[in-house]
Image (cartoon, grey):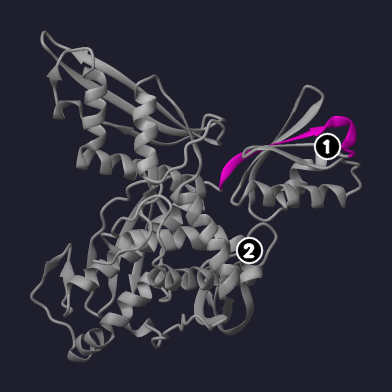
Amino acid sequence: MRTIGLSLLALLSTPLAAEVKVLPDGMMKTTACAYGRGNLAISSAKTQAAAELAAFIKGNKSLAITDNNQFLGASLDDDTVRLYEQQRSDIIEGLSMGAIPLNTSSPSLSGNDTCVSVSLSLLDIPAPSHQNWEEGTQNISVTVSGEGWPKNGKTARHHAEMDALQRAVSQVVGVWLTQQHSQSSLMNLQVLNDTETTQMQELIGQQLSSHSEGLVKEWQILDSQNIDNDGLQVTLHAVVEKKPLVQQASKLLSVIGSPRVKVIAPEPLKTELTLWLGEQGVEVANVASLVVLAAAELANTTNTSRLHLNVSVQDLSGNIYGHWKNNPALLALPSGQRVEQDLMSVHLAHEQQAQDLQQALQQAFTQVVARGGLVRQIWLPQSQIKQPQKLQALLSTLGGVSDVTIYEKDNNIVASLRYKGATGDLADAVHQVLTTTGNRLSAISIENDFTLRY
């Protein structure tokens, strides 16, 4: 069991369980689903499918034809079995790093889920490549494949190259995640399975993809071929710079690990929860962009009391990222003056309850990053903005910025947006882009973690 300085939890939702089939030609195939719609759900489903394939291969040292995980009487060709056994460890490593090309079907909808079928052929396995992560190494070379289709006025080649570059960044992130052993600012928990590592790698790779031009030093196309629906698949060799990748990935991990939070709860729950969060390494402050909102309610019978606890994580705009409820049936105490505080202390100290709450918090913090970062507001005087109608498009061009909305309030233009990095970095980027477009603005000030004002 490997230990890493961060709890890597399943992203966004719990995907549907997948089964792996082995076809007569040795191809392994599975279908996986993830909650939601769009590219993030498709990517999550692909990640889950890759993790299912890796788990299947890890649990089967030899290969036989299967159907719904039931072994059939027919056997594979001896050469296919031998090839599988020779490549098995490299396949597992390659899947965890996103280094093996997978054949993916078009997405389909199943209720609230998006599903994809993913297959892996032994003949498609590239020669193993072992990246060097020695301290003196400045660059890491990887060979990856990407797919793309014409969209939004850009060619299939452009999207295929961008997809490949994201995979290059994601692959190097995977190497780094398996090598680094630094202590998380939140908690030091064990990684229980490869799915968690793969999903965290996928998340960080996605979030860093918008900065791939600053992470990929150079790259060249090795091969390209047409695929269905006017698409294109490219294979390229990329050189990823280690130092900026580690810096940006570390920033994302710190946000996931322990953002600053404000606790809103009645006493004595506020004190109990604040103490508990401090023990987990979560910084609590009176001013923060994330709020831990908690409530407690006693359920009294004739002589005993049970406690119902509710904890949610949300931002100041009301977006909810995570929720946890205790199990009140675990404990009942004789009614008395201190029974509420005693029940709180016991529930928060209970091993399973504490672990569930830790996981709920970690998943909430992870969702903040997965959605594009914390929500920030930028206040600008209307009189100093020359073309306010272009402000939304202008701010949307900034790296790491998403979900920009503009509204007016008290003679100000307010821009609400998500940003992946630190508030100070956002302030520098916003001031630079606004002052270079002819706006006469004074110095920008950082009011707090979530408010910038001119």
Q: Quadrant of residue 302?
A: top left
Disc sitting over residue 246 in the figure:
none
According to the picture, the residue beneath numbered tag 2 turns out to be 211
Q: Quadrant of residue 239?
A: bottom right
Q: Residue furthest top?
A: 302
The answer to whether residue 392 is left or right of residue 198 is right
Amino acid bearing label 1:
Pro
| Rendered-image quadrant of the N terminus | bottom left
How far, Cα to Cα, is label 1 from label 2? 27 Å
Of callouts 1 and 2, the N-terminal one: 2
Residue 157 place in picture, x, y as percent:
63, 72
Measured along the vertical axis of the image, is residue 356 above or below residue 193? Answer: above
Q: Nearer the viewer, residue 162 or 264?
A: 264
According to the picture, the residue beneath numbered tag 1 turns out to be 388
- In the image, the segment drawn in magenta is 373-386
Q: What's the residue at 35%, 54% (across, down)?
A: 7
Q: What's the residue at 36%, 56% (across, down)?
A: 8
| Rendered-image quadrant of the C terminus | top right
Residue 103 within the segment the image draws in magenta: no
Amino acid bearing label 2:
His
Residue 308 place in picture, x, y as percent:
26, 23
Label 2 Cα neighbours within 10 Å, binned few <14 / some 14-19 / many ≥20: some
Label 1 Cα neighbours within 10 Å, binned few <14 / some 14-19 / many ≥20: some
Residue 183 place in picture, x, y as percent:
40, 60
Q: What's the residue at 65%, 41% (across, down)?
A: 417
Q: Is residue 22 visible?
A: no
Q: Nearer the viewer, residue 244 or 147?
A: 244
Residue 374 within the segment the image draws in magenta: yes
The answer to whether residue 214 is left or right of residue 348 is right
Q: Quadrant of residue 292?
A: top left
